[in-house]
Amino acid sequence: DNKNERGRDFQFEWIRAVTQQKVIQLAGLALASDFTPRKVAVQLSNDLYRLIGPRLEQRGVSIQTDIEYRTGPFFVIAVEVNNIDWILLMEHTANQWARQKREWIRDQRVRQSVAASEKHLGNKDTEKKTKKKRSVPEILIAIRRRYFPSRNEVIAYLLASFYQLHYFISLPILQVLYALGLKYSVDKYILRVVSDDIFRYVEKKGMEMQLEIKGRSSQATFMLAALREMREDKRKEEAEVGEDAKPIVGPLMGPAIKDDKNDVTPPPGFSLPESLEFVGLEVDLPVGFLRLRWSLLNAESNFMKDAFFVDLNYDKITMGTWSANENDIGLPKAPDGIDENSFVGATMEYSYLMPKSAFVSANMCYATWEILQYDANSLVIKEKTLTPEVPYGSTFISWTQYSILNTGKNSCRMVCSVEAEFPNGQPMVARQIKSGMRAGTAEKFVLLGETICRYADAYP
């Protein structure tokens, strides 16, 4: 009786545990189905930011990570590898390699056992199926896996092989290889190792996502893809609703300029100034260079104030004037007797009230534009922004740079970058300040590209 009673108790506990698990899964699916893509991106980015560090610590890798950029369904998590415990990483890789090999052998034995048993039972259909020739794609995939392994597979095999050597031999070799040229490949492999764990975590929540691991220099390309996809989504929404979410105020970019249709060949030795520390956006714009230069710089243009700043929800905007050649800067052609080289070094001050966010209240910002390069092929503007009303605002200066290259045929290329300066030395929260600055300016850069494209499309 006691045995039967214990058996019934076990069955009851098992049924209750399974039922509870199913209820949790259904609740998670119901919650996930009620999420918008933006809410899903917020939740996933926060979860990944929280989980990726501990996951990598188990493999001997210590990192610094920040959510660099997040808008709509897109987000970027920046990861910097600080230190690698090569012994722990080699051990974990060797164990994983051996486990995968055991699983492959076990699967092969199961297939052979099933085929042998069915053959013994005389199942002719199955026998014919097992003898069926593989298709050409399957053969090519098998050849690639056997003779042309991926870069991550090579790194994994290298780490697993070095684990078989003594540490006095393997550690110096790995450290030298990492320093000489394998840093990017090893760092990417380390992040790829946790990808399977991340995808399993996402699937448990009833969600889907695309995850790509890119080098820091490739983030601008991601921003461009995000910009294009968001613009396409907005067009679909506007077509369904029948009205613009952000109305076009008017032809604020001015009329098309005839010379923008011409081909452009930069002179020998031409180059743009180097970008700042972090490149937040690199994008090709469907608007002529001279037309864009006029809309950004000329005293008669209201594009920045009435279009871009309005899209940013700025308030109390006060625009200054250029310190020199106020009425000539930005014109398609400089007036007679005016040398465009004299425009370089000109400055303009303006201020605005930035709306409150989840972290800071509404605050005044004071910015200064300075022209670094001005000619028929390029325009480079450097912006200095002071935010004394935010926490630690008196300890840093935000520098942003807009580099615009004339590519001809009514198009140009814009590269936006940002850098933090700490005049009196870096405070304890310098890393958080840099992260917030990169995230905030990334959204600003993308919105500038979107605003330019929107007005260029409305008034070609």
Image (cartoon, rainbow, N blue to C red):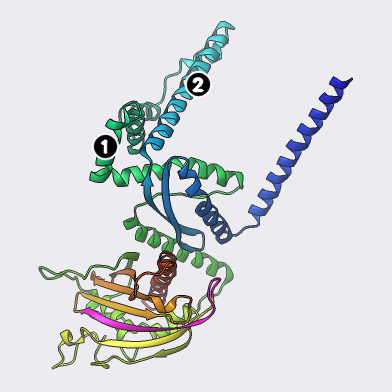
Extreme residue toward the left, this view: 268
Badge 1 density bin: few <14, some 14–19, many ≥20, Cα 10 Å: few
Which comes before the other along the chain, label 2 or label 1?
2
Q: Residue at x 27, y 31 (%)?
A: 169
Q: Residue at x 28, y 41 (%)?
A: 175
| Image position, residue 122 (x, y; %) | 57, 7
The quadrant of the image that shows the N terminus is top right
- The type of residue carrying mark 2 is Asp
Picture layout, residue 287 above or below residue 150: below
The quadrant of the image that shows the C terminus is bottom left
Residue in front for this viewpoint, 302 or 445: 445
Mark 2 element type: helix
Q: Which residue is mark 2?
A: 107
Mark 1 element type: helix
Image-based side of 278 in relation to 378, left or right: right
Q: Which residue is mark 1?
A: 172
Image-based side of 120 in relation to 329, left or right: right
Residue in front for this viewpoint, 420 or 445: 420
Residue in front for this viewpoint, 80 or 284: 80
Image-based side of 173 in relation to 442, left or right: left
Q: Quadrant of residue 224?
A: bottom left
Extreme residue toward the right, this view: 1
Q: Residue at x 47, y 64 (%)?
A: 230
Picture layout, residue 322 above or below residue 393: below
Q: Quadrant of residue 218?
A: bottom left
| Image position, residue 340 (x, y; %) | 17, 85
